[in-house]
Image (tube, rainbow, N blue to C red):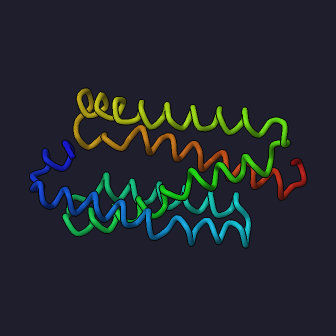
Amino acid sequence: PVYLLRHDYGVEEIGYTFSVFIIGGLLATVPVTHLADRFSKSKVLLGSVCMVVLSVLGLSLLDNIMATKVFAFIAGASMSPIFPLSRALIGSKLSTEKLPSGTALFTAIYSAGCTAGPLLSALAMKYWGDRYIFSLMLAIFVLFMVRLMRNKKKRMLGYN
């Protein structure tokens, strides 16, 4: 909200923008996770992460109220399935004995990221300017995307 307020968005527009983000997530999570069950969880996760990267780039580079809403919807739709898809991958990779501790560790790390992300984004805005609000998130998702692509390549070559 602070970012949008600094860019002269009214409180009403900020509310609409956040609503569009949430609606995107609500509408996409079940169909995307269903696709992951029918196809490959890692491929669908990679697609979601790629869409997050593109939508965050759009949010960072464009300063148009309609474009912001469109990219907010895409960001919500692509970001929301990441937790359940990642959790499902953990469930498929770990043994039954290791599943509780693996799930707990994943949830703890995910929660720490959700807590630290806004704080670190605020610091990025303070020291580098408002346009860098998404820079940390973008860097993390690009690294995640590269990692998923490397894993996919290893599986294709038979290393995994």
Q: Is residue 127 left or right of residue 87?
A: left
Quarter of the image for residue 155 reads bottom right
Residue at x 40% of width, y 66% of height: 24
Residue at x 72% of width, y 46% of height: 90
Counting from the top left corner in percent of width and height, residue 25 is at: 44, 62
- Toward the viewer: 96 or 147? 96
Quarter of the image for residue 14 reads bottom left
- Toward the viewer: 156 or 5? 5
Counting from the top left corner in percent of width and height, residue 101 is at: 72, 32
- Toward the viewer: 132 or 12? 12
Counting from the top left corner in percent of width and height, residue 26 is at: 44, 65
- Asked if 86 appears above or below 48 in the picture, the reply is above
Residue at x 62% of width, y 47% of height: 146
Q: Is residue 80 left or right of residue 21?
A: right
- Asked if 88 appears above or below 77 in the picture, the reply is above
Quarter of the image for residue 19 reads bottom left
Residue at x 87% of width, y 55% of height: 157
Counting from the top left corner in percent of width and height, residue 137 is at: 43, 42
